[in-house]
Image (cartoon, rainbow, N blue to C red):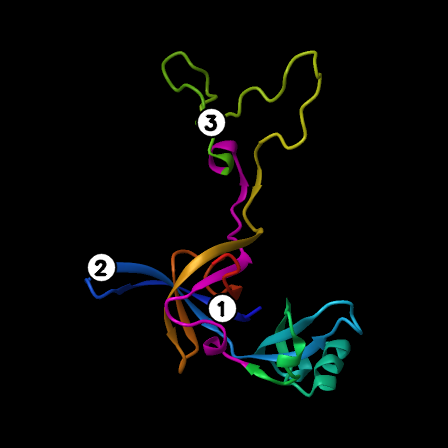
Amino acid sequence: MKAILGEKLGMTQVFDDEARAIPVTVIKAGPCRIVQIKTPETDGYSAIQLSYREVPAHKLSKPEAGHFGKAGVAPARHLVEVRVDDVALFQIGQEITIADVLEKGGKADVSGVSKGKGFQGVMKRHNFSGQGASHGVHKVHRAPGSIGACATPARVFKGQKMAGRMGGERTTMLNLEVVEVDRERGLVLLGGSVPGPKGSMVLVREAVKN
């Protein structure tokens, strides 16, 4: 599995050979370093642990500082674990850049935490159509309406769509086109939208369903 951590910078547009505007999301990806390697013999599965965005050592707790010190890797703010098929291809301290993960014209999966919308009603949260808003109708235009049946089953089923907190969930966008890869600046331009606000952390992977 090819993967790298990055930061969402925002959206812009680029033009193709036919002068068509293509909306893209810009991600500052990597460089990341391998802090730990997990093997089936010691941990029961194969994975590597990546670090991103270096920070001063005094900002870490003692267990965190010990973890980075054991690996001989500079302290970082973010850690993420990625499953791999063969750990023999990696070594502790190895640097991973966006050029090692993606190339122009490929496909990518991006995971992140979506924007939090707070407490929202059913029309915004679940795309309900709402009730009538003509003359003589009480102010129930955005109300959910009936939520249950009758004496049978005499309850509201679990999972009933209602108002509640919206957004702020782990989300993955699949098969985004890799429009451009800037190796020098560590940037990748992906066609389409990426979950989360500007400045949020995202995990960029080579598409698994490509």
Residue 189 shown left or right of residue 144 in the figure: left
What amino acid is labelled 1 in the image? Glu
Circle 3: element type: loop
Q: Is residue 181 visible?
A: yes
Who's the residue at 70% across and 11% down the image? 151
Who's the residue at 38% across and 56% down the image? 192
Q: Does residue 111 belong to the magenta stretch?
A: yes
Q: Tell which tag, 2 or 3, sits nearer the viewer.
A: 2
Residue 67: image quadrant is: bottom right
- x and y percent of residue 159 in the render? 64, 33
- The residue indicated by pointer 1 is 7
- The residue indicated by pointer 2 is 20
What amino acid is labelled 3 in the image? Arg
Residue 104 shown left or right of residue 97 in the figure: left
Q: Does residue 150 belong to the magenta stretch?
A: no
- x and y percent of residue 32 in the render? 56, 78
- Name the residue at the bottom extreme: 72
How many numbered tags mark residues here? Answer: 3
Looking at the rendering, the stretch of residues picked out in magenta corresponds to 96-124
Q: Can residue 60 be seen in this view?
A: no
Who's the residue at 41% across and 56% down the image? 193
Name the mark on residue 194.
Answer: none
- The residue indicated by pointer 3 is 142
What amino acid is labelled 2 in the image? Arg
Circle 1: element type: strand
Quarter of the N terminus within the rendering? bottom right
Report crowding for label 2: few under 14, some 14 to 19, many 20 or more residues within 10 A (C-alpha). few
Query: Mark 2 or 3 closer to N-term?
Result: 2
- x and y percent of residue 94 in the render? 60, 84
Contact (Cβ within 8 Å) of mark 2 with mark 1: no
